[in-house]
Image (cartoon, rainbow, N blue to C red):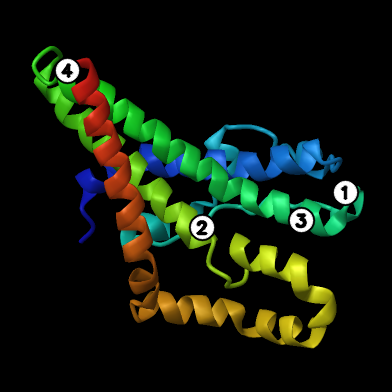
């Protein structure tokens, strides 16, 4: 049975991670000259616009899901290759930003332990903790070079023309590779070190920041 309380405490982090990630893709594409995301209503931080309900349900139960991808038309970019790269990297960059903001919120929250309502404090701490952790997960997950993740789109944008057949073949089986990695725990092995490294360093930075002002 899923941990209902744990799911509820993770939902704010999930909605934030999804909305900022997809909005960053849409904003980058729009700034680079492609109006497609704006025309499709994706140039917003409203999580309900970006959430895929099946993906969200699977995340709640199994810890792995997905959001609605932002569609772009690279032909609208002045430089198609680098436009694709910048749009792909915008999502993970947004998650890094949110993880850092979460660490800052943690630094503000911890000294308030005995100054605010205890029940409220006991809710806010795990919510902020999840914001840091899950955005670190979203960051490194999306940088993996597996279709349809952002890391794959970066590599494809840079090297597709010289390796067309290889990329087309890889895309046919990319989704199976991702499912295989999830089912057999390979994805966890790939993510645990970088996620833990970033999460730990952000918490250490927050603790040092607390020390400066207390």
Q: Is residue 58 above or below residue 20?
A: below
The quadrant in which residue 19 appears is: top right
- Would you name the residue on which mark 2 appears? 66
Give the mark toward the camera: 2 or 1: 1
- Would you name the residue on which mark 3 appears? 84
Which residue appears at 18% of the width and 25% of the height?
Answer: 110
101 left or right of 162? Answer: left
Residue density around tag 2, few if under 14, some if 14–19, many if 20 or more, within 10 Å: some
Q: Give the secondary structure at mark 3.
A: helix
Distance from Cα at disc 1 to Cα at disc 4:
48 Å
Query: Pointer 2 and pointer 1: residues touching (CB < 8 Å)?
Result: no
Disc number placed over residue 77 in the picture, else none: 1
Say whether disc 2 or disc 1 marks the residue closer to the N-terminus.
2
Distance from Cα at disc 2 to Cα at disc 4:
35 Å
Query: Pointer 1 and pointer 4: residues touching (CB < 8 Å)?
Result: no
Say whether disc 2 or disc 3 marks the residue closer to the N-terminus.
2
Say whether disc 3 or disc 1 marks the residue closer to the N-terminus.
1
Distance from Cα at disc 2 to Cα at disc 1:
26 Å
- Would you name the residue on which mark 4 appears? 112
Q: Is residue 120 visible?
A: no
- Depth check, front residue: 105 or 12: 105
Query: Pointer 2 and pointer 4: residues touching (CB < 8 Å)?
Result: no
Say whether disc 3 or disc 4 marks the residue closer to the N-terminus.
3
Query: Pointer 3 and pointer 1: residues touching (CB < 8 Å)?
Result: yes
């Amino acid at each position: 049975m899923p941990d209902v309380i744990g799911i509820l405490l993770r939902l704010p982090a999930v909605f934030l991670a999804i909305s900022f990630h997809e909005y960053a893709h849409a904003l980058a594409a729009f700034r680079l000259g492609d109006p497609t995301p704006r025309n499709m209503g994706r140039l917003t931080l409203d999580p309900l616009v970006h959430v895929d309900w099946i993906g969200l349900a699977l995340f709640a139960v199994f810890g792995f899901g997905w959001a609605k991808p932002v569609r772009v038309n690279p032909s609208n970019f002045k430089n198609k290759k680098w436009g694709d790269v910048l749009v792909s990297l915008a999502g993970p960059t947004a998650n890094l930003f949110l993880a850092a903001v979460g660490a800052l919120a943690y630094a503000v929250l911890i000294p308030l332990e005995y100054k605010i309502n205890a029940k409220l404090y006991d809710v806010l701490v795990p919510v902020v903790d999840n914001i840091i952790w899950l955005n670190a997960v979203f960051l490194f997950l999306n940088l993996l070079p597996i279709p349809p993740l952002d890391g794959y789109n970066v590599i494809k944008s840079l090297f597709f023309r010289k390796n067309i057949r290889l990329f087309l073949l890889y895309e046919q089986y990319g989704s199976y590779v991702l499912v295989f990695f999830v089912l057999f725990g390979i994805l966890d092995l790939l993510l645990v070190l970088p996620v833990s490294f970033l999460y730990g360093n952000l918490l250490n930075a927050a603790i040092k920041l607390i020390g400066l002002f207390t």
